Image (cartoon, helix red, strand yellow):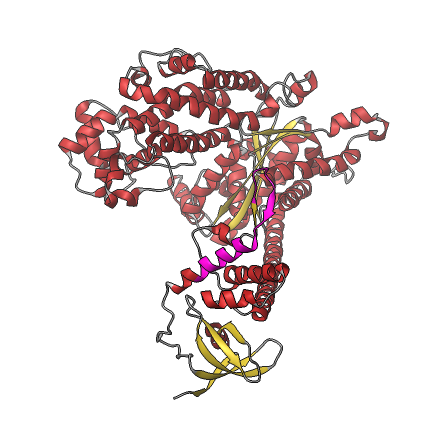
Amino acid sequence: MPKKSLPKCVINLSDLKVPIEKISPVIKQIADICGKIPNNLPSTRTIERMIDSKIAIAHKQISNVLSNKIDTTLYTDETRKYGKTLQTYIVTDDNKTSYVLGLREMLDKSSKSCLDTFKEILKDITDHCYEQEKDNEKQAGYELLCHLKNTMSDRASTEKAFNVLLENFRREILPLIIEDWNKLDVTEQALCSKMNNFFCGLHLMVGIADVCEKALYKFEEAFLEGKDIGSAHYPELKRFYRHESGTLRLIRTACKVFAVGEDEKSGASMAWMTFLKQQGEKNLFIRFKHNRFNLVFVLGLACYFHKTLASIFLDTVHGTNNGLLRAVSLDIKEDLYLAGCKSFGLISKLITGPLWRLLESPGHILEMNKFYKQVIDFLVKGVSDTELAVKFCNGTESPFDTDISTDDKLLQDLVKENTDVDAIVVPMVQNLFQAIHELLSRLIIDHLPGGTFWEPEEYTLLSSKSALKHNRLPEFVFGQLDQLLRYRPNATVLTNESFIMYSHNKTRHWLASLDEIEKKKLITESMKEGKEQRQLFRSRLADIQIQRIEVQKQKQQQLQELERKRIQKAEDMTNMVCYYGLWQNQNQLEEGLSVLKSEKEKRAALEAQLKFRKTVLKQKHPDKKIYNFSKLNERGKYTKLTIQQLKDNVETLIKDTLKEPTHENATQGRPLLVGKTIKHSFSDGNIYNGYVISMVPGFSMWYNIKYERDDAIYAFNLVEDMEKGDLSIVVANQ
């Protein structure tokens, strides 16, 4: 093999998923088949240097292909892998062809970090520009930035903030790139500067699942009125319970039993599959991943469809020899939970499923406006119109006029009458309609009447032609990254970035389209640039590490400051309560108040007792309002509690502590302190001799102390002070 052809061969083999350590053996094997003997095979280190050049080649492709593409769309998203924060940037052109611009590690997921990382990528594209003559005034990276007209992301606050920063940065760069910018009037400049910010339609599915689960939880709670059904009758089965609706619990536990690979210990997936095969059915249960698009609704459908066979299987075929199987067997017979599963199934088949297919179908993103409005109008009507809700449940009405196909067994089973269950399904569905409507009205407001993208102008339609209806591209890139990390967990982010960019952007095919002389020159340049990119990558990682150390120091300082303020606050409260004394029984409470003459002093003393017990002693009480100094009146305004009400609250807290042991118990590693003379050091540097009188009732670490030449009795956490070395025992009284 000619030496000059070796880099191209290595790069192409790596793009065909040949592992780095196998590339030389593959070359040798092919040479043997061809009857050739290679003079020298590249080492692993040499191969890695050649692979580093892939990212430089990919940047040249981007600068070449996207230089003439206008009104492009930028897709961004962030993920965490092995503790690293990674961000990907992808661009689509008017043909909706996508190009990965980069996959980079960041300090954190803040909008500023996202923009700084994007600037790095633009600089790298400029440095590796395909054009032989690079014009400093018209850099390739900045031209790419100016061609961006749309953004697509999820609705995370950091993504929204990034969109604002990106638009401002782009506005600064436009005068440097567009000729005669100053000759444009204000309206033309504003039109050029404006960007369309779109948000992922598929992420609506996750939001719809979340709000439906919350609405279902409230519906079940109101429907049951405190009664137990299904597995709730058996305390030993409560270990499968979480803060979720019974329907979601049934779906989750049913997946553990019936889904392959979910629960190998307590599940029965293989026996279930065998049983279904005999019945001529397929297993619809898959692993439960709550955050996956539409999954909860699909699994609700599966649970409802398999309800009869699942019950027969658990009761008469396999048996219920553990708690998980018993719980599912009991819950899957309950009409309320089956109504929830049926409601989820209907929403999957008639709302979210068709909406998903529309979002993934070809077409302009703003074509979704009319479909979003259809859904909203249907939900609004369905909330109040019981007849429409009934028709929805029997499949004759839906937002998208879905046909009830006789070939769809699942849908046929859903719309088939089930008297006991349907009586619950109709009001349940109306509750879910309300929850979905409230969510969509907030999230897709830009696509509804009066919104930014409702009835768009021709310019907006043309400039947003490149935008997809969803932000699935970054998820696809992260999926590729997961596969690479499983295969090579120690590979650097740069290596994975080069693999993903070269593969996704079809750089190998673009390279093959160049003439031979140009191709060789490009690869030679890229070999050198790849080495520089590796050095730059290490330098950036070092900068990130320095920034992480700085952030860690700042957090440490913040924690120290918080601790200082906490101690200062505790000291202030301790000083305040020392002035009045810590009242530890009813007599002390009465005596303490009796010596105070004014209402103001009594209020201050009682508030000091409450503050000290809440903040310093950290006394717990079921009624958190017991520590309040005011209450909400009938007119919706706060009024101060009376002296008697404050006194009653303090008295209640005192009585609670007296229920606990009031004498000191021996604890391993801690000496008894009551009756001992101590030396007590304070933060001001002074050391006082004192005598420990007793333990504060209800608080085993707090003691009452009387110091020499001071008649007052104080309460301090002596155990904590002893651990800090601020307290020592001088004499133990006999």
Decide: is 436 above or below 548.
above
Q: Quadrant of residue 598?
A: bottom right
Estimate the x, y position of residue 30 in percent, counting from the top left: 40, 41
Whether residue 659 sits left or right of residue 478 in the image: it is left
The residues colored magenta run: 632-654
Quick check: 62 left or right of 336? right
Relative horizontal placement of residue 111, taking residue 208 as reference (left or right):
right
Q: Position of residue 60 (x, y in %)?
A: 63, 37
Q: Which residue is painted at 61% across and 26% down in the image? A: 93
Q: Residue furthest right?
A: 183
Residue found 18% across the figure and 31% down from its top: 313
Residue occupying image coordinates x 80% and y 24%:
187
Instruction: Report if residue 520 is visible in the image.
Output: no
In the rendered view of the protein, which quadrant contains the C terminus? bottom left
Give 373 or 547, whichever is nearer the viewer.
373
Residue at figure coordinates x 48%, y 32% from the top left: 207
When asked about the image quadrant of residue 697, the answer is: bottom left
Q: Is residue 661 found inside the magenta-colored segment of the image?
A: no
Q: Nearer the viewer, residue 50 or 259?
A: 259
Task: Using the image as rendered, state which of residue 410 and residue 79 is in the foreground.
Answer: 410
Classify 731 as above or below 215: below
